[in-house]
Amino acid sequence: MDEGYANLPTSHLLGSVPAVAVTPEERKAGVPAEVGNATATSRLQQFPPAPPAASGGGYQPPGSPLDGDVETQTNWKGYFNVASYAPYFNVDTDVVVDRLISSVYPMDGFFRKIDANPDMYGPLWITTTLIFMLAAFGNFATYLMQRKSDLNIWNFDVSYFSLAASVMYGYAIVVPAAFFFLFQYFGSRPSLIRFWCMWGYSLFIFVPASILLLIPVEFLRWVIIAGAGGASSWFIALNLKECTEGADMMALIASASVLQFALALFIKVFFFA
């Protein structure tokens, strides 16, 4: 009776794993069954498992900000993969609010906060919100000024929206990228993602400033935009100085600060004139 039970096949039993056969390609190459089984077993240690003939090691997960910079992609296709950018939108409300406060109060060490986990969620929504506020409040401010002067010729200017979108999106993308290459050229080792994050949060101060610019008093408007531009420029200068790690980049830092203040003047002249 014991001998009969020992001879029963067990491959059909629940939880049993059938042996992995050698593939036709491995059989033609003369690979023994034991080697084929060992290769298949080691292949199961990866997730997802790599195909047998894959030379690149199969699936490559996107890099995480905690591991460093995302610029180190496995190949150029990673830049066109949405999953590669998912880690930069994995932030909660508390983190974003804390970074917004730090962008208004530059002495709070903003660059150290984003060093391990830079995000693109905050910069994207800050820039988008600023575009809509400049287009809407710019028209409303013009209406208030003309109403104050008893002129009834006001019309809503739709071009404010296209102008704000092209300038703000262009500034938030192109300017950090330009300074990233300049810093690299002069021997520094910055991070493009951190630059985009820093410049994006630097625009937040213009959101409350655009509300205050509705005051139909020209002198106060210039004071408000000068204060917002100065604070934003100081924020950029402090964080650029911190990321250069003691290198002599004062010319580039001063240029970035002047450009940030020029953006503030552009907002005043073209949207709240």
Image (tube, helix red, strand yellow):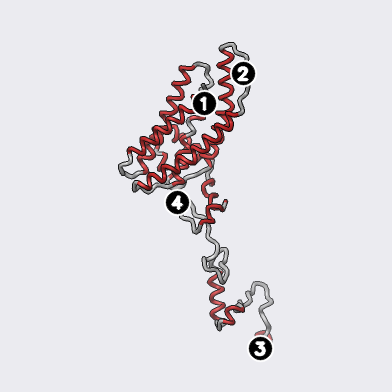
Proximity of marks 4 and 1: CB atoms separated by less than 8 Å: no
Residue at (56%, 21%) from the top-left corner?
141
Q: Which residue is mark 1?
A: 270
| Amino acid type shown at disc 2 | Trp
Quadrant containing the N terminus is bottom right
Q: Position of residue 61 (x, y in %)?
A: 53, 58
Look at mark 2 in the image and give the residue it sits on.
Answer: 154
Q: Amino acid at mark 4?
A: Asp
Per the rendering, the mark at residue 3 is 3
Under circle 4, the secondary element is loop
Q: Give the alpha-carbon distance from disc 3 to disc 2, as whole Å.
A: 101 Å
3D distance between C-alphas at marks 1 and 3: 94 Å
Q: Which residue is mark 4?
A: 69
Labels 1 and 3 touching (C-beta < 8 A): no
Q: Amino acid at mark 1?
A: Phe
Counting from the top left corner in percent of width and height, residue 84 is at 53, 52
Distance, label 4 to label 2, CA atoms, is: 50 Å
Q: CA distance from mark 1 to mark 2?
A: 16 Å
- Callout 3 secondary element: helix
Within 10 Å of the Cα at label 1, are there few (<14), some (14-19), or many (20+) other Cα atoms?
few
User: Is 191 displayed left or right of 147 in the figure?
Assistant: left
Q: Secondary structure at mark 1?
A: helix
Discs 4/1, front:
1
